[in-house]
Image (spheres, rainbow, N blue to C red):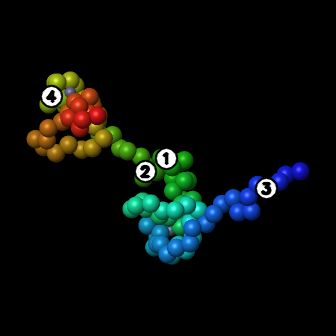
Amino acid sequence: MFRKRDDSPRKMVQGNWKCSKCGTDITELPFEPSGDLPLFCSACHRERMNERRGNDRGGFQRQMVQGNWKCAKCGVDITQLPFQPKEGQEILCRDCYKAQKGY
Ligand SMILES: [Zn+2]
Ligand SMILES: [Zn+2]
């Protein structure tokens, strides 16, 4: 026979938040929200999940910009970037970018 170990396996956290998308009041969450993470009501949460699955809407996908640049540091060819570079902007390849950031 199936026996539950815990009376309430999913503890709901009570509070007073607003959905980051539609502004609906949220009074309970299945987790303790941390920092400035966006919160979503159950309807918007479901919508987000659907969007992530059918990703041809592109809303949450990182758009890569195709082009032909050179790394300002090592001179390697760069054919795509995760952003549209501004004119005169120094472009670094992934390795140099990481090195500069100190990873
Ligand atoms: Zn919502
Ligand atoms: Zn480089």
Residue that numbered label 3 is attached to: 4
Q: In terms of secondary structure, where does tag 3 sit?
A: loop
Q: Residues within 10 Å of mark 2 (few under 14, many from 20)?
A: few
Closer to us: mark 3 or mark 1?
3
Distance between the alpha carbons at the discs numbered 3 and 1: 37 Å
Q: CA distance from mark 3 to mark 2?
A: 38 Å
Count of numbered circles on the image: 4
Q: Residue at x 39, y 62 (%)?
A: 36
Q: Type of residue at label 3?
A: Lys
Residue 101 appears left or right of 26: left
Q: In the image, what residue type sits under mark 1?
A: Asn
Marks 1 and 2: in contact by CB < 8 Å?
yes
Looking at the image, tell me whether mark 4 or mark 3 is earlier in sequence order.
3
Q: Mark 1–mark 4 contact, CB under 8 Å? A: no
Residue assigned mark 4: 73
Say above or below: 64 vs 3. Answer: above
Q: Which residue is disc 1 drawn over?
A: 55
Q: Earlier in the sequence, mark 2 or mark 4?
A: 2
**Residue 9 position (above or below residue 88):** below
Residue 29 lies in quadrant? bottom right
Q: Are discs 3 and 2 less than 8 Å apart at CB?
A: no
Residue 1 percent across, percent down from the top left: 89, 51
Q: If the picture is divided into quarters, which one holds ligand 2?
A: top left
Q: Residue at x 70, y 63 (%)?
A: 8
